[in-house]
Image (cartoon, rainbow, N blue to C red):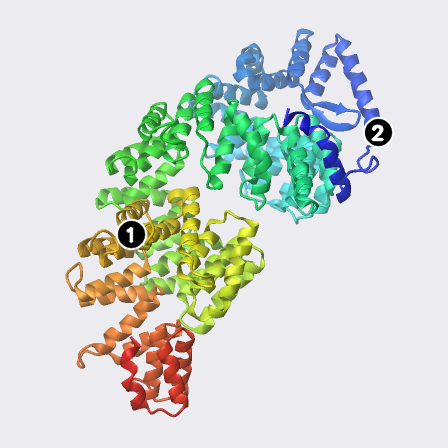
Amino acid sequence: MFLGAAMRGLAHILAVGLVLFGLLPSASAAEDTDLAARFAKEQALVETLSRSTTPRDQRQLGDLYRDGLIFSADNPIRKADRDAAISAYRRAIELGDNSPSVTVSLGRLLMRQSGGEGFAEIEQALQALALQGNGDATYLLAVDAMENRHVPLEQAIPRLEAAAMLGSAAAVNDLLAAGVSVGDTLRQAVLARLTERAEAGQAPAALALFQIYADGLLTERDPQKAMQWLERAAQNDPVTAVEQLGDQYLTGLNVEPDPARAADLFRQAARAGGRNAALALGRAAIAETGMPVSSAEARWWLQRASEADVRTASVELSNLDLKIALAFDGAPEERQKLIMAALEPIADDPDALANLANQNWRSAQSEVIGKVLLPLLEKQALDGRTVAALAYNAWLEANGRPLPDAVARALIESLRKTPFVSVGYSNFTVAGLALDGRMSEAVLSRNQAIRLLFKAADDNVGQAMLRLGQLYRQGDQLARSDSFAKRWFIRAGERAVERANWELAEMQAGSRDQAERDEADRFYLTQIDAGDPRGGLAIVAARLRQGTLDGIVLERAKSVIQTPTDTIALASLLFSTGTPGYVQEAAALLSGLRQDELEPGDLVSLGRLKSAMAVTPEQTAMAFSMLEKAAESGSQVARTALAASYLSSVMQRDKVPAAIAMLQQVLVDNPKDPESRLLLARAYMLGIGVERDARKAASLVADVRSENGMRMPKATLLEADWLAFSSAGRNPAKAVALLDAQAARGSSAAERALGEYYLNGFGPAIRPDAAATRMYEAANAGDKEAMAALGHMLLNGYGLNQSREAGLGWLERAANAGNTAAMYELSRVFALRPEAESDTRQAIAWLQKAAERNHPNAAYQLGLAYLTGEWVDKDVTQASVWFERSARSGNLLAARTLKAVRDGITAKEAAIVSDTAD
């Protein structure tokens, strides 16, 4: 037992803690006055029925065992006894009861028992019922054909359709789930049959109609009619239907949410024996659902559910006790004892421990919980409990800690002895851990892991096929090969691994082979026809990279864009091109969004995009206000995004301390938040708002990288910069290799960084041609910094043939996509052309845009233009405004010029010093 004798009495300590919080229930608070009487009456009835030799009594006994008996005199939760029910139904049949209800009930139970081994004994009777028009019997025979006899779905469809025609709601659901089109004749017959049964008081039929109208399965969605049928079902079914009614009032899916009524309905169902209702009441105090349920009541119901062996009840009870323990503000050692007491009941249950670990490893209290939970998981893992070992690894990985070799070896051995799902899937699990760096080379080499992965694929594990495709596509661990990647993606897709189809299409969309690109188009258009917005976003992204997006394809893509999230994503894709027409299209898409209706996450995305699109101070301020509003909701993502915006804006320097404080608070709430740590790392690296500390920056980046690997390109870029520029750990070749691996995973930022390394010699050597290739790939993928760099290279003929027209084109795209430096460079290009080719109108327009976006030199040059009257009407007041904005952005020359202007300097004297501005 957990910690041996040292744990004795900790339950009492927990009870004391609960008393301190006023959370222990009184006897009267949860007492059901007639429960003991109901329990005694039911037990007497079971005893009487058990002695009876009449078929009717045996049938009633079977129904009681099937639906569950009251657990005890003080626990109303019902616990079913499947084996006892089967025995009672068999006895009823032996005594002559061949009624449909007994036959179908026995058939259902035998179907679930040991893979349907005993189903054959009832099959003939079910076939006879099916011939008599019994839909439930027909459905059971169809399920037996598919699950136990492995008949292909297409061969079982006629029997499912027959069952549906005879009124089987389960058959209807299976047909729809399989994508089978239900014709009008069948639809009308099913609705008529179910309606007839529901009106006769059959709760299952009324529940089926609720589902049909709630989901719009066979008819138009009608929430009002759905709720009417659910209310009717609840009149005849005190448990299942009432539980579903409670869910509706809790979630508000088809009716106005009413947490108070939901709680009353769950109490009603729980007192009638409802297991799910008891869990819902227990979770109310954990998840803060809004239901008026005290911690005392929640704990009482979870205890009763746990006694009745309700799955996850013990975990939820430990969760609630953990919440109470963590809220304890007494001595740390007392809180630690409360945590130990909370976990003690599940200390020997690896499934419960794993479930709890998977719920808490990202919480702000993970370190506190981990001190107690991790030793328990480690013990179970070393004892050969696979689920505990996997949960232990997940917790350690999330916290940037390695998996001990002893646990890794124990996991491999436990999977060898008792395969997880299958031998092939076990091989895939081990291979994945090794390839992700979770197992050391001493335990399993990368070559051994690759061999295991191939074995898993040979055993038809679709996820293993997907991983092989990814390895071949990325050139990671295996030599890069698009043909091999394609082969494995196709095989994985055939095994119903959806992600494989998307990765294959993405790879084909980037191919130079037109036939491959056409294949990707066909896949995306098929997804659009199925109503999947991912298809619309993917085909727009692909066509933009190819330069082949037309109005027809764009309109088809827009036809499946419904949610604000997808609308913002599509607008972002279009805006990132920097093409004027697409920029206008993006603005039009966003114009239909109402800020007050957006979730915090969508408001963050919109604020970021609006900030990039802003060309005036008012628009920038509006973008910041969106981020500030989202942050007020308490969302960590929103607070991090706002802090990032403050840190990156030259005009928000007064907000830098607030940004640092915001990030530090996010890390108090969630110490492992990767985005906040990366922003702090950059701040330490550059000395923004904090004292410069390169080692602290490197440590933060290393932690994020160890936890996320290649999943966070930002971390990869920061680590590469550390390797390229730090004096302590300088390794330019490793920096380039790291960026190359990230770029192979589709990161345009990594492509651009590689271009910068090759362009400036940050890596082992200066390679202008390689820089041009990388910049083009990144620019074509919508990276505005890469667009600006590529434009500059084309203008100067560096790394590729000089082309002023192409260079200007890329600079304009970068500027339209929000790159302020590109705006400023365009103004200079147009201004510094030979006099016959100069375009002062465009020069001043781009200069104005760059200045409005707080480019220090642009604001200074615009101030000079107003001061001298060159390109614009002379206006000393306006000149002072722009000098002041430039000075606020950090331009010391602007500050001196502003002082001189206020002291009466002439325009000619100011122009003399302007050459030093750049």
Mark 1 or 2: in front is: 1
**Horizontal relation, residue 625 to residue 451: left or right:** right
> Which residue lies at the image location 38% right of the left edge and 92% below the top edge?
904
Q: Which mark is residue 166?
A: none
Q: Distance between the residues labelled 1 and 2?
A: 72 Å
Q: Which of the 4 image quarters holds residue 20?
A: top right
Quadrant location of the N terminus in the rendered image:
top right
Judging depth in this view, the residue of 821 and 177 nearest the camera is 821
Label 2 sits on what residue type? Asp
Crowd around label 1: few <14 · some 14–19 · many ≥20 (10 Å): many
- Which residue is identified by label 2? 34
User: Decide: marks 1, 2 in contact (CB < 8 A)?
Assistant: no
From the viewer's side, name the closer residue of 648 and 145: 648
x then y, percent, for residue 788: 28, 63
User: Image height check: is 913 above or below 745?
Assistant: below
Q: Which residue is drawn at 55% across and 30% down?
A: 377
Q: Name the quadrant containing residue 687.
A: bottom left
Give percent across and percent down for residue 305: 69, 30
Give the residue number, with chain letter if any, for mark 1. Answer: 751
Residue 433, compared with residue 667, is above or below; it is: above
Nearest to the observer: residue 514 or residue 862: 862
